[in-house]
Image (spheres, grey):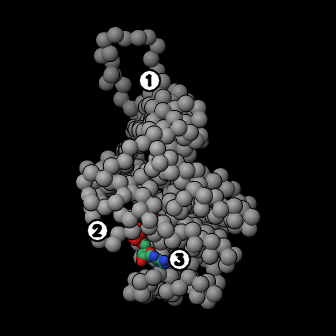
């Protein structure tokens, strides 16, 4: 069992990851640290663990194997490095940090120390994304020729919100939502995006980061695709779509770019030989439809993290990818 201390306990930690830790037989929550005293106390009491207001004090006072960090992005670099200085394995929330150079420094330090560093891109563990991977590998849609991801939420002006401040969050909709899409698409294809063009806009709200971004890409093997992310589409209008089209069919995931393992995957395998000028064969074949398993993505992520810590043979390919995702973010904002 891996003993976890948490830094930044009030947001996603309390909503998703700590409950997943409590459920998992592989994890033990031993302490929480938070900058807001009332939150630290409430979370500590809720889970019956000691709470701290300072991470060094916590790491000096308790015994743990790993630290889960779920603070605003601008805090990640310093806190991840501090946890490593205490010889801990780290699960840090996405995105890894503010810049790819910072990310590279962090990953190199973990490699050197032989410690696990995992970044919280949990969407690749969704059963329907795993199914999409299987279908792609089995030639289920032929040669992939077009990919589209659309991910959104409603995020209006909120005074003091760190995500709406470029220095604290590093960016807006792309930094927050687009990174999930990049990481997931590269995982599905097992190849990198190499050419990027993007447009960002702050159209609806008055914060300084973008509320809308459209990015187009070309992968190493030449697949073209695009990612659209928005903070200005109502949650009830969010489709959270991931679409892959190939020379023999499609895979369309709806509602799978999400915190819960729901949604559907529709798979159509329907190769076509001849040119049909009438193009009237479009609804001829019904796709196969699959549903999400409904398991807890955060628990899956935690258990894979625990297995990596316990095996002591660290595979840094996902960690390296998280740095590469930061490079893509920089291209989106600087092109
Ligand atoms: N993987 C996911 O599904 C997912 C979902 C939401 C957020 N996130 C990521 O999690 C991280 C946190 O996001 P959030 O939505 O929980 O933010 P949040 O603002 O809701 O919560 C962050 C918590 O950290 C605390 N905090 C701030 N500065 C701190 C510091 N220096 N030391 C200790 N605690 C501090 C805040 O008081 C707050 O309780 C971000 O990196 C975000 O991108 C991931």
Residue 158 is labelled as: 2
Seen at 44% across and 67% down, the residue is: 168
Assess mark 2: CB under 8 A from ligand 1? Answer: no
Answer above or below: position of 11 versus 288.
below
Answer above or below: position of 87 versus 233.
below
Find residue 37 and report its image quarter. bottom left
Q: Earlier in the sequence, mark 1 or mark 3?
A: 3
- Say which of marks 1 and 3 sits in front: 3
Q: Which residue is mark 1?
A: 270
Answer above or below: position of 299 versus 328.
below
Determine whether label 3 and label 2 are within 8 Å by CB: no
The 10 Å Cα crowd at callout 1, few under 14, some 14 to 19, many 20 or more, is some
Q: Is residue 40 left or right of residue 231?
A: right
Determine whether label 1 and label 3 are within 8 Å by CB: no
Seen at 74% across and 68% down, the residue is: 113
The 10 Å Cα crowd at callout 2, few under 14, some 14 to 19, many 20 or more, is few
Q: Which residue is mark 3?
A: 6
Closest to the observer: 296 or 58?
A: 58
- Say which of marks 3 and 2 sits in front: 2
Q: Earlier in the sequence, mark 2 or mark 1?
A: 2
Q: Position of residue 188 (x, y in %)?
A: 54, 42
């Amino acid at each position: 069992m891996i003993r976890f201390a948490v830094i930044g306990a009030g947001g996603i930690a309390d909503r998703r990851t700590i409950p997943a830790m409590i459920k998992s037989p592989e994890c033990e929550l031993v302490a929480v640290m938070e900058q807001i005293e009332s939150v630290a106390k409430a979370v500590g009491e809720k889970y019956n663990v000691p709470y701290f207001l300072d991470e060094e004090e916590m790491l000096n006072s308790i015994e743990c194997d790993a630290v889960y960090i779920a603070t605003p992005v601008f805090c990640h670099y310093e806190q991840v490095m501090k946890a490593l200085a205490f010889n801990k394995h780290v699960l840090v929330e996405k995105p890894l940090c503010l810049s790819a150079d910072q990310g590279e420094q962090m990953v190199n330090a973990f490699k050197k120390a032989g410690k696990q560093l995992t970044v919280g891109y949990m969407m690749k563990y969704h059963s329907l994304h795993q199914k999409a991977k299987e279908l792609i590998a089995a030639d289920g849609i032929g040669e992939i020729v077009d990919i589209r991801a659309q991910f959104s939420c409603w995020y209006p002006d909120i005074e003091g919100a760190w995500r709406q401040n470029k220095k604290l969050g590093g960016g807006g909709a792309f930094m927050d939502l687009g990174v999930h899409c990049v990481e997931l698409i590269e995982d599905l294809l097992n190849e990198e995006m190499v050419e990027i063009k993007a447009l960002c806009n702050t159209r609806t709200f008055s914060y300084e980061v973008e509320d809308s971004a459209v990015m187009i890409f070309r992968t190493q093997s030449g697949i073209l695709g695009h990612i659209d992310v928005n903070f200005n589409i109502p949650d009830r209008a969010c489709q959270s779509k991931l679409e892959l089209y190939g020379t023999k069919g499609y895979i369309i995931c709806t509602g799978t770019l999400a915190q819960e393992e729901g949604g559907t995957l529709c798979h159509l395998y329907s190769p076509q030989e001849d040119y049909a000028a009438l193009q009237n064969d479009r609804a001829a074949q019904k796709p196969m439809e699959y549903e999400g398993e409904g398991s807890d993505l955060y628990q899956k992520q935690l258990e894979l993290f625990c297995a990596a810590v316990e095996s002591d043979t660290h595979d840094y390919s996902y960690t390296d990818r998280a740095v590469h995702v930061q490079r893509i973010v920089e291209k989106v904002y600087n092109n």
